Amino acid sequence: MIRITDSISVDPRDIVESFVRASGPGGQNVNKVSTAVELRYDVAHAFLPDDLKARLKGLAGRLLTQDGVLVIFAQEHRSQERNRQAALAKLVQLLRRAALRPKRRIATRPTKASKTRRLESKTKRSTVKKLRSVRPSHD
């Protein structure tokens, strides 16, 4: 099991990896060896809390297909094993970010002093703008 948090873990059997040829530098290695990794994790059918799935949907963006499959592509390294580790690290990082529950915002009211400061600054600004429109008289 891949541990995400103390209470959440992912079964490695739910992760599907496929290997393709990477683009970019690498010499003859690029033409011969399939080093890039495409990791797929079916979020829609995973045993994860619903609130985590909802946050993951927002965080993943275009990495999540319409079917609810998270697709992570890694081709940063020249070896297949390092790309596998990088893709898995990206998945774990994304799930950990989704596992963090956002703090609830407590509604507060502005203080009397802050209201006063705001109104004073508006009055000053208004005065500056009024002075711009007044034409100097030529006596």
Image: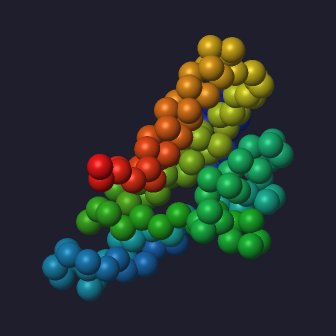
Judged left or right of residue 6, residue 123 is: left
Question: Quadrant of residue 102 in the image?
Answer: top right
Answer above or below: position of 70 versus 3. below
> In the rendered image, is residue 121 in sight?
yes
**In the image as oriented, which residue stretches furthest toward the front?**
139
Q: Residue at the location (42% across, 64% down)? A: 74
- Picture residue at 45% right of the left edge, 53% below the top: 133
- Number of on-image labels: 0
Pick the residue in front: 91 or 52.
Answer: 52
Depicted 79 relative to depicted 109: above or below: below
Residue 7 seen by the camera: no
Depth order, front residue of 85/33: 85
Q: Is residue 41 left or right of residue 68?
A: left
Residue at 46%, 57% (x, y): give it. Answer: 87
Q: Residue 59: x percent and y percent?
A: 62, 53
Above or below, 45 relative to 23: above
Q: Position of residue 49 (x, y in %)?
A: 81, 42
Q: Quadrant of the N terminus?
A: top right
Q: Quadrant of residue 28?
A: bottom left
Q: How is the protein colored in the picture? A: rainbow
- Would residue 46 appear left or right of 17 to someone viewing this image? right
Percent x, y of residue 4? 61, 37
Q: Position of residue 51 (x, y in %)?
A: 80, 43
Along the horizontal axis of the image, is 95 left or right of 19? Answer: right
- Residue lying farthest to the bottom in this orientation: 31
